[in-house]
Image (cartoon, rainbow, N blue to C red):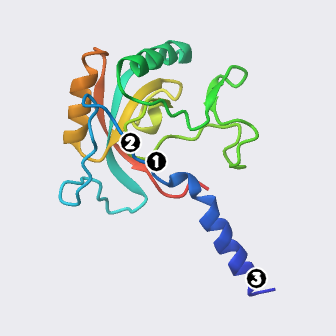
């Protein structure tokens, strides 16, 4: 029995952190920025291995989910960018963005799980996940999370043609296991 318990604990730890895998790269048109991830240009080193310095590109922020959802659909129609909700939706009763109650992740089912991996997909996130001292109900229309400032600035330059309120936010994002 004593030899089985460590094996079970190791299995739970390994399978419990599956949401931290990066998304598959997608083909993009010429108006989308390709993330540069060469080791010499990556700015994601951090003394604490559980955090990475990333650059979050935000098209706009608001308190109202439906306003930003509409803007996200407009950007999706205007840009060759995909929408990745990670299975989340806006739950009116809870007044927040959540995973479905029957999500495969028992810990976060029915609750918010943040986008944390680099990529250039559209999603609605809580700004407080990326910026300290921010109202926890402020929602951000995120258009990308990038490993370098250069990539984020390039993406923002394209985005500015469609969203005058867009900005780049340098963020220390927790990338460790959330279980």
Please say if the residues under marks 3 and 1 sit with CB atoms less than 8 Å apart: no
Q: Please state the horizontal and vertical placement of residue 34, each as a whole percent of the image.
A: 27, 41
Q: Is residue 19 above or below residue 144?
A: below
Give the residue at x 46% y 34%: 128
- Identify the element where label 2 is drawn: loop
- Give the residue number, with chain letter if any, for mark 1: 23
Please say if the residues under marks 1 and 2 sit with CB atoms less than 8 Å apart: yes
Please say if the residues under marks 3 and 2 sit with CB atoms less than 8 Å apart: no
- Identify the element where label 3 is drawn: helix
Category of crowding for the residue at label 1, using alpha-carbon neighbours closer than 10 angstroms: few (below 14), some (14–19), many (at least 20): few
Q: Please state the horizontal and vertical placement of residue 139, each as a whole percent of the image.
A: 48, 24
Query: Looking at the image, is mark 3 or mark 1 earlier in the sequence?
Result: 3
Give the residue at x 30% y 31%: 29
Q: Is residue 70 above or below residue 137?
A: above
Q: How far apart are marks 3 and 1 (CA)?
A: 33 Å
Q: Please state the horizontal and vertical placement of residue 46, each as a whole percent of the image.
A: 31, 59
Query: Looking at the image, is mark 1 or mark 2 earlier in the sequence?
Result: 1
- Asked which quadrant contains residue 140, the reply is top left
For marks 3 and 1, give the one nearer the viewer: 1
- Asked which quadrant contains residue 65, the reply is top right
For marks 3 and 2, give the one nearer the viewer: 2
Q: Tell me, for residue 4, which label it has, or none.
A: 3
Q: Please state the horizontal and vertical placement of residue 52, each as a whole percent of the image.
A: 36, 53
Q: Distance between the residues labelled 3 and 2?
A: 39 Å
> Left or right: where does residue 148 sit relative to residue 67?
left
- Give the residue number, with chain letter if any, for mark 2: 119
Query: Looking at the image, is mark 3 or mark 2 earlier in the sequence?
Result: 3
């Amino acid at each position: 029995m004593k030899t089985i318990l460590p094996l079970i604990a190791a299995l739970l730890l390994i399978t419990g952190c599956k949401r931290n895998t990066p998304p598959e790269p997608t083909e993009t048109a010429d108006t989308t920025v390709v993330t540069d991830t060469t080791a010499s240009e990556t700015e994601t080193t951090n003394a604490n291995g559980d955090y990475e310095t990333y650059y979050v590109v935000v098209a706009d922020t608001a308190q109202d989910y439906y306003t930003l959802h509409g803007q996200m659909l407009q950007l999706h129609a205007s840009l060759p960018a995909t929408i990745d909700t990670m299975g989340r939706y806006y739950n009116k009763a809870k007044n927040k963005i959540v995973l479905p109650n029957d999500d495969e992740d028992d810990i976060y089912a029915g609750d918010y799980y943040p986008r944390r991996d680099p990529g250039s997909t559209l999603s609605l996130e809580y700004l407080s996940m990326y910026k300290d001292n921010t109202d926890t109900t402020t929602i951000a229309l995120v258009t990308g999370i990038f490993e370098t400032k250069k990539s984020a600035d390039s993406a923002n330059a394209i985005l500015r043609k469609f969203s005058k309120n867009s900005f780049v936010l340098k963020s220390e994002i927790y990338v460790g296991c959330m279980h």
